[in-house]
Image (cartoon, helix red, strand yellow):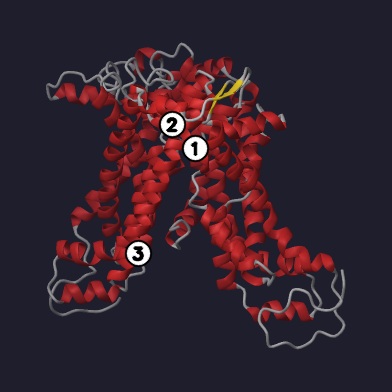
Amino acid sequence: MMSTATRGRRPGRVRWWTYLLLSAATAACLFPLYWMFIVATTDTATATKMPPEVVPGGNFFHLLGLVLETVPFVQSLLNSLAVATAIGVGQAVLCSLAGFAFAKLQFPGRNTLFVIVVLTMTVPTQLSVIPQYMIMTQLGWVDTLQALIVPGLASAFGIFWMRQHISATISDELMQAARIDGASTAQVFWRIAFPIVRPAAFVLGLFGFVTAWNDFLWPFIVLKSPERYTAQIAIKALQNSLDVDLGLAMSGSFLATIPLVVLFVVVGRRMVAGILEGAFKG
Amino acid sequence: MTATLTPAPSAELPPPASPRGRGLAERLSPYAYVAPFFVLFGVFGLFPLAFTFYVALFDWNPIGDQVFIGTDNFTRMFSDPRFWNAAGNTVSIWALSTIPQLLLALVLAHVLNHARLRFALFFRMSVLVPYITSVAATAVVFAQLFDRDYGLLNWLLGLVGIDPVDFVQSTWGSHVLIATMVTWRWFGYTTLLYLASLQSVPRAVFEAAAIDGAGPWQRFRHITIPSLRPVIIFTVVTSTIGGLQIFTEPLLTGSGLTCGAVRQCQTLTLFLYEQGFGQFEFGYGSAIGVALFVMVVAIAAINFVLSTRIKADR
């Protein structure tokens, strides 16, 4: 393919050290997960042995039992799933709706409002956790999952991104044709616009899901009782217990990571494509 | 549902949102579509931010009294060695994580941009695996790998005759450990951001340079880096803003809210949390939040100046 240069270096040639470098990077990325699995399946004596064991042991179910005794870990995984799914779906839908309005509808104040949306991306709101906590106290939402879900349901970045996609993929002719057929704005969105941009909305929802699943600071502040913990807070609780060699925390980390690894194997290709399309260029 | 009987053929694009025959609801619907974001941002973003500045002026006990004390929290903060210690730790960890991360990402993006690379998707997906791993899990694994007595790293160091290093208990050691976690989790993501930007450079540019005799290093130096300049600035800013908010790594690395006996790895956000939710000093905690906010705004402003200057240079 491409130019067949007869002189000079051929840009297409890949040197051996390229593969060496990329293999080293891959190993560095995957090894900690493998190590998590090793320590999560061995007993204390083996885990602390030198040289370390590099094959999984058979102690996984023993550690799992200890984990479940210490915190309601299954419940915490379900809590994480509920929170992350709600945020993922919420962002996909609400950001698509707003992106659609900014891209395809005309209404007074549209441009001003869109500039405001873009500007809010530069506001670091995470630094005001103390007043945020006070608001949750007023709402009576402390120690509830909606304290995690509701603030994350829409994002400025998501609106910005969906607006770009809708502008690029939905022609004005299509909009007009739908109008002539008598469709209301809501019908145009649900029957025409959303089905077309659903792949983009899906990727946005995925990133929302992953971010919500892995969030720590805010759930750590808001959640109090163990049965409300998300998986990340449960890991912290495991580490608090008498956990000398981090075996329990490792098992918890392993359990909390497996769902995302499975998800990533299935849809990671689309996350990579999303970033390469400029999803998160800002 | 209302059917439009006589749609006026209009040359105006997109068609008017309120053709005759549609009700008020139809005209207001665009506002309904954008409203959720503004409501959520107002209630959970903007209002708390403004309120931070207000609470910072009080001696504010969540279950006791709220006494107005003016700027006392700020005077106290500027003379508080724990604040300066946390600020120093934050900057140190930020530098140790951002610089290697961005350099590594530059090299990997350049390499991944090869037209004939095999297994390209596998490599691209692999470097994103740390990004989907949670910070908490990352911290737990690296704390184990860097453990003084049972860590793999110290065992390897022992093989070459180096005494075990107590990473968590020493200042630089804990900073290196936390910076390693941050770098590990983010370098692949940054790599893909750079790759995205590189892929918009026409391949012909690289080919022409190669034909003209430019070696790999020259192509990297004179094509890759200049074409990435805007996204490099963007990632420096985002990693700086992220770096100011490092919290989970030090919390799970050290023991408790101080991150070690002598606060050797306590960051500003951890200090904020300690004062706000450990000591219930909402006022003082908010003052630390204000300080962080000012730093973030300053960095964003520097970025704005730099990026406009770069655009002007072109």
Task: Check chain identity for marks 3 and 1: say if they share one.
Answer: no
Q: Considering only vertical position in the picture, is A260 above or below A222?
A: below
Question: Residue A222: x, y in percent?
Answer: 60, 28
Q: Earlier in the sequence, mark 3 or mark 2?
A: 2
User: In the rendered image, which residue does mark 1 sit on?
Assistant: A127
User: In the rendered image, which residue does mark 2 sit on?
Assistant: B269
Asked if the residue under mark 1 is in contact with the one under mark 3, i.e. CB atoms within 8 Å, the reply is no
Q: Chain of mark 2?
A: B
Neighbour tally class for label 1: few under 14, some 14-19, many 20 plus, Cα within 10 Å? many
The numbered disc on residue B12 is none
Q: Chain of mark 1?
A: A
Q: Amino acid at mark 2?
A: Thr
Question: Residue B103: x, y in percent?
Answer: 25, 49
Q: Considering only vertical position in the picture, is A159 above or below B283?
A: below
Which of B308/B176 is in front?
A: B308
The structure residue drawn at horizontal position 30% and vertical position 65%, both measured from the top left corner, is: B310
Asked if the residue under mark 1 is in contact with the one under mark 2, i.e. CB atoms within 8 Å, the reply is yes
Question: Residue A200: x, y in percent?
Answer: 56, 61
The structure residue drawn at horizontal position 33% and vertical position 28%, both measured from the top left corner, is: B84
User: In the rendered image, which residue does mark 3 sit on?
Assistant: B308
Which is closer to the viewer, label 3 or label 2? 3
**Helix, strand or loop at disc 3?**
helix
Question: Residue B233: x, y in percent?
Answer: 33, 56
